[in-house]
Image (cartoon, rainbow, N blue to C red):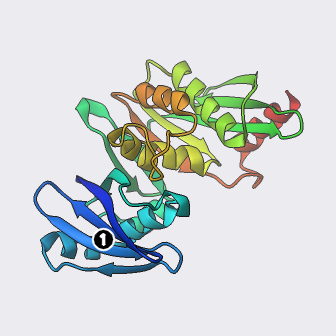
Amino acid sequence: MQMLVFSMEITNRENDTFFIRINNNIENANISFNPYTKQLTFIDENNLSKYLHKNEYQLRKLLHNKRIDTYFVGFKLVFVFRDKKNVAAFNDKIKIVVLDRRNNKNASYVVSKKGKTKIYKLYIDGSFSEKNKIGAYTIIIKDLDGKYRQHSEKIVEKGSCQTELQAAIKGLKLLESVDFIRIISDSIYVRKGLTEWIMYWKLNDWKTANGEEVKNIENWMIFDKLTENKYIEFQWVKGHSNHFENTLCDLYSREI
């Protein structure tokens, strides 16, 4: 799937409508957008404007995710579209999402429910106490022979999402010499972070669509580094649904 890089700048404002110039290093396309009513208008009729219109879902996702206070004249951002992205497939939790970084690639795509048959499986789950501001995670590794090993650890983190991210990082460290890994988790945060968000952040100097530094940037940088030259599958499972390994991870984490 080809990645296309664009830059945008908010050039003007009339009441609650902002005028935005988008460039792809070939031509400019101007749009207007009202972040309150979500009204989007394509002003030009050139090739870039037609492409943006064709990929309106991705464009709207970017515009809708920006906070109201980050709409101001002079705001600039670098962003990425995935050409011919199957949005429905990426949003389908049942499907497996792949991050393939072998041979200097940085590709992510969706495969069937099964994925690869010969692959190390990394089950992760975490538990976090808002009251005590402390968490724990558990990792269960299943090797190619079907043998299990388990690792649990207590950590001081800022929330449940960060606890899950720490679990994934530790799991990849434990499997440092393994090139084919499937991460099985009930965390959409971990799945989307590495297969969708992180490539945008890197192009934008680790800034979000709001122009702010990515939260937990140190952990995401470590996660990004650990996946170099690896083939990673991400499989989502519903939490507390009697999934054997996920339930074990949850129980161990809560006990700690």
Residue 1 visible to an observer of this rendering? no
Residue 71 placement (x, y as % from top left): 46, 62
Question: Is the residue 175 above or below the residue 185 in the image?
Answer: above
Residue at 35 percent across and 51 percent down: it is 77
Give the residue at mark 1. 55
Image mark count: 1
Question: Is the residue 197 above or below the residue 104 in the image?
Answer: below
Residue 115 placement (x, y as % from top left): 43, 49
- Give residue 27's quadrant in the image: bottom left
Residue at 40 percent across and 66 percent down: it is 87
Residue 108 placement (x, y as % from top left): 35, 48
The amino acid marked with disc number 1 is Asn
Q: Is residue 17 left or right of residue 104?
A: right
Q: Residues within 10 Å of mark 1 (few under 14, many from 20)?
A: some
Locate the C terminus and report the quarter of the image it occupies.
Answer: top right
Residue 100 visible to an observer of this rendering? yes
Locate the N terminus and report the quarter of the image it occupies.
Answer: bottom left
Element assignment for label 1: loop
- Give residue 224's quadrant in the image: top left
In terms of depth relative to the viewer, which is nearer, 107 or 184?
107
Residue at 32 percent across and 41 percent down: it is 203
In terms of depth relative to the viewer, which is nearer, 37 or 5?
37
Q: Is residue 8 left or right of residue 25?
A: right
Residue 168 placement (x, y as % from top left): 58, 32
Question: Is the residue 137 above or below the residue 85 in the image?
Answer: above
In terms of depth relative to the viewer, which is nearer, 187 or 176?
187
- Give residue 25's quadrant in the image: bottom left
Residue at 57 percent across and 34 percent down: it is 216
